Image: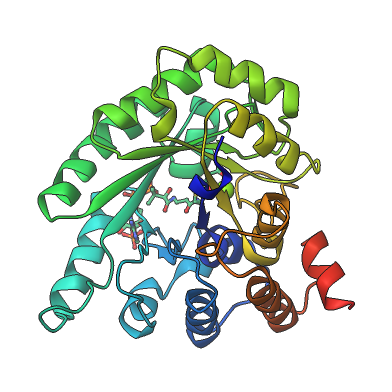
Amino acid sequence: INLSDIRIVEVGPRDGLQNEKTVIPPAVKIELINRLNRTGLRHIEVGSFVSPKWVPQMAGTAEILTKMERVPGSHYPVLVPNMKGLEMLLRTLEAHPVPAGAPPLTDEIAVFTAATDAFSQANTNCTVAESLARLEGVAQKARDHGLRVRGYVSVIDTCPYAGQVDPAQVKNAAAALLGMGCYEVSLGDTTGTLNWLKTGNLLASFRDALPTHKLAMHLHDTFGQALANIATSVSFGVTTFDASVGGLGGCPYSPGATGNVATEDVLYFLQRPSLPADAPDLASVAAVGEWISQQLDRPNASRTGKALAAR
Ligand code: HMG
Ligand code: MG
C-alpha cells in the first residue's frame, strides 16, 4: 500500500453545508471554496442543483460556480439529481464561457442513488430502479457535454428507514452506476454505522464484482469509526476517500447523522511521519476548518482541527 496514492475528495461545501440550520450567504460558501483551493485539495464538491424546496441550503450553486476561484487541473463536481438539475448546470456553463485555455467552471457532476428504496424515496422521491433509469440519461447527456460523472450509493450499511442493508443491493447499485459510465462510485455510509470489521466484510463481498480502483468510501463519522474504516478500506486496496473540512455536515434525510470524516483527521491519519510533498497541507486545512466553524457558529467537529487550534 502506497499512502501517497491516496486521494481526498473534499465534500464540505456540499455535504457539509447542505445540512446547516442557518442560511449561509453565497459569499461565505465562495470564500470557503477559495480557502480550500489554497490548501492543495484538488477535488472539491462545491454544491448541488437540487430542488431548493427539498434542500434550501444548496440554492445559489450557479452563482458559486461563476464566482469562485478555480485552480487549473482541479475538479469541482456538483451534485445533480435529475435532468432538470443537469440542464440548469449546462445553462450556467453556456451563459459563462471561459477564455480559451482557462479551466472550465466545472468538468464534473455527481449523481446519486441508494441501496434501499426507502432511502431513495426519502431523498429523491423515487425507487432505486426509477432513480437508475433517470440517471442513465443524465450520465449520458453529461458525458456528451464533456463532463465526467461520479456516482454515489447511499446507505451501504444501514438505512434509517429500512434497517440493515443487504450488500448485494449495494453491489447492484454500484455496478449500475459504473455501467452508465461513472468513472468512480463513492460508497456512502450515510448513517455512519460501519465498523472496521463490517467494512472489511462488505468490501470482501464485492471482490470479483466491482473494480476496487473505481471505488471510493464516503464515511459519515456518526459513531466515530470512520478512520478505522478507512484503515480497513486501504487494506482492501481502496485509495479514494471523501472528507469534510471541520467535519461539517450530515444528511438532511438521515436523522442524527453527523458529517463526513473530517479532512484534517484523514490527513493526520495519513502522516507517516510526515505527509507526502504533494498532499494537501494539514495546517492550512485545519485553519479553514476553524474559520468555517466560526462562520457557522458551531464547534469544530475535527479532533485534529481542535488539537491544532489549541496549540
Ligand atoms: P420531486 O418533487 O419528485 O420533483 O423531487 P419533481 O420533478 O416533481 O419537481 C418538483 C419541483 O421541483 C418542481 O418545481 C420542479 O421544477 C423542481 P415546482 O413546479 O413545484 O415549482 N425541481 C428542481 N428544482 C431545482 N433543481 C432540480 C429540480 N428538479 C425538480 N434539479 C427531486 C425530486 C430529485 C428534485 C428532489 O427529491 C430533490 O431535489 N432531492 C435532492 C435531495 C438532496 O439533495 N439530498 C442530499 C444530497 S444526497 C446525500 O447527501 C447523500 C450523499 O452525501 C452520500 C451519502 O452520504 O449517503 C451523496
Ligand atoms: Mg453524505
Q: Nearer the viewer, residue 231 or 60?
A: 231
Position of the N terminus by quadrant: top right
Write the residue at 58% across / 66% down: 17
Q: Nearer the viewer, residue 123 or 79?
A: 79
Residue 116 versus residue 280 in the image, above or below: above
User: Residue 285, position in %: x, y?
Assistant: 64, 71
Q: For this view, does 252 lie left or right of residue 53?
A: right
User: Residue 99, position in %: x, y?
Assistant: 13, 84
Write the residue at 63% across / 24% down: 162
Write the residue at 24% across / 65% down: 88
User: Residue 164, position in %: x, y?
Assistant: 67, 20
Residue 57 versus residue 267 in the image, above or below: below
Position of the C terminus by quadrant: bottom right
User: Residue 69, position in %: x, y?
Assistant: 38, 83
Q: For this view, does 5 lie left or right of residue 161?
A: left
Write the residue at 54% across / 29% down: 118
